[in-house]
Amino acid sequence: MHRSLPAAIAAALLLSASTLSGAARADAAATDLDTVLVTATRSELRLADSLVPAQVIERTEIERSQARDLIELLRGRAGIDVGNTGGRGKLSSLFLRGTESDHVLVLVDGVKMNSATAGMAAIQDLPLAQIERIEIIRGPRSSLYGSEAIGGVIQVFTRGSQAQGFSPYASVGGGSHDAREASAGFDHRGERGWIGAHGAYDSTEGFNACRGSGALFQGCFTDEPDDDGYRNTSITLRGGYRFGEALVLDGQFLQADAENEFDGSWTNRSRIRQQVTGARLRHAPGDGRLALSLALARNVDRSDDFLDALPRSDFQTRRDSASVQADVQLAADHLLSLGIDHGNDRVDSATAYAVDERDNTGVFLAYGGQAGAQRFQASVRHDDNEQFGSHVTGALGWGTAFDNGLRLTGSLGTGFKAPTFNDLYYPGSESPDLRPEESTSLNLGLSRIAQGHHWSFDVYESRIDDLIVFVYPPPDYRGVGSNVDQARIRGAEFAFGTTLAGIDVSLQLSHTDPRDRSGGANDGNLLARRARTTGRLDLDRDFGPLRAGITVQGAGSRYDDPANTVRLGGHATTDLRLEYALHRDWTLLARASNVFDRQYETVAWYYQPGREYHVALRWRPAR
């Protein structure tokens, strides 16, 4: 029997309550009041001043969690649910506030990662060892970024140190399923210039990903009871130079090459490449009245598929972009941002598409201001795409602060998602007349950020129209796409963090009700593969040179199909972790995940990892 999520959370809270004594320490704040956020407004903003729900995960928290990949790090956080097809490196869908996985815009150093063919980003292939910081924005941001930001935006910033001088590091580790990992790198920052290089290798022999089914439209369409491994080799380069006091040039490069084994009747092995290249020139005079920036970038997403050693297909999408942005300080606490984004998407594939290239130009205007205790934000954007024409989106935000630290916020925004090349032109299921999916979302929030603790509570509703679905009528089962579905999503999120008796406490709970409102046979059903309830509790404490931590993470039941006939039970897992400082430069890490060996699925037919162990040694010279 699977332990329910509420029971697991309650048990963990009772355990922590028996350990914790004394009041919260006011000098150990769980949230840094000066944390800066850039994704929410495309300009620097204090996290505490954001009018849309947001979260920042810094490198220190990534290392403390001992998560093995990005999926594991994000799972169970406020508003986030994940569907995974068999462990490390396997296809993963990230659902943000109950929206589709291709409704989440993923950025790496400001560059769009969502595939122009599949629509979603291959987040399972972004190596955690190369990530310095993550910003999560919950709710639509199409008014700033255009297509693909209906559910929100997740921006990943690659590895880099801001400390002066030379900063090297290295780590090596291994564990269950013949897991092996190694990473090393350095950053050097001088008076005007900086440079950094980082490399990582990660591999596992894996386990049998799919319990198999040769039946049509079930499981992975085959029975292959073998281990399905995964390997990822990555490199990050970055550098920059400050010319005088006002002009800065910087650039970054990320390449991750992966090989993934899985169960399938058509293909069972893939070679994947994720590549991001970007450069930015920024001019910001010392008076702070005006800042101008020019950015150029390219994202390459490539997948070569095989059946054993036999090549079967290859897909590559290339997204080139250029943007110009101006930030104008109208007065104290009043900032106006305006800019132009131009993008070109191209498909290079052995599969012939009727159209394999398109351009998009977006123009946006954003304002943020404050008057006393009142704070305002507004943005509007016009996108012109040669495939689907023009589209206008907007957002409004308001917040007010009270003397006791409470803050009330409200935001309203529209979003849209342009049809992908697969939606429009995939051979055999061409649907060139598809329209963009559209959404309207409302969020109300109440929060308090104090020196010793923080909490937030948000409720929201999103209505999504013209959802794209494909049906496969007999006799030839050629897919036909149409804008027929509608969805209504309501939900609530609660987050709390503090330090009690030396124990860092972080609790995140989410409830969402994503319903089909298309009026057809599935009207009123829950959208597939989303759990209605998710949660995560993290507890960490220092004991001199030893640091111990526990994470309880879980999700309620979900349905794997739109008809709500295939039910997957809920689950809760417990992870334990230890760090021991052998020396001021050396740290030994040990981790046991899913310690109760819970068996569960987030996608029907696909196993999730059981009990696993991992140890690592990290070297980082003290400064």
Image: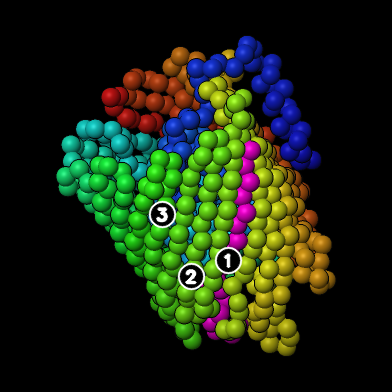
* Residue denoted by label 2: 383
Nearest to viewer (mark 1 / mark 3): 3
- Kind of residue sitting beneath label 3: Ser
What sort of colour scheme is used for the picture? Answer: rainbow
- The residue range painted magenta reads 408-429
Task: Tell which circle, 3 or 2, labels the residue nearer the N-terminal end.
Answer: 3
* Residue denoted by label 3: 337
**Is residue 435 rendered to the left or right of residue 563?**
left
- Kind of residue sitting beneath label 1: Phe
Residue 385: x and y, percent?
47, 76
* Residue denoted by label 1: 416
Which quadrant does the N terminus fall into?
A: top right
Residue 388: x and y, percent?
53, 78
What's the distance in space between the residues labelled 3 and 2, CA to CA? 17 Å
Instruction: Describe the element under mark 3 as helix, strand or loop.
Output: strand
Residue 373 position by quadrant: top right
- Kind of residue sitting beneath label 2: Asp
Q: Which residue is drawn at 57% across and 67% down?
A: 417
Residue 319: x and y, percent?
40, 68
Who is closer to the viewer here, 251 or 115? Answer: 251
Question: Where 119 sits versus 242, above or below?
Answer: below
Question: Where 79 sits versus 210, above or below?
Answer: above
Residue 576 position by quadrant: top right
Circle 2 residues within 10 Å: few <14, some 14–19, many ≥20: many
- Whether tag 1 and tag 3 are in contact, CB under 8 A, the answer is no
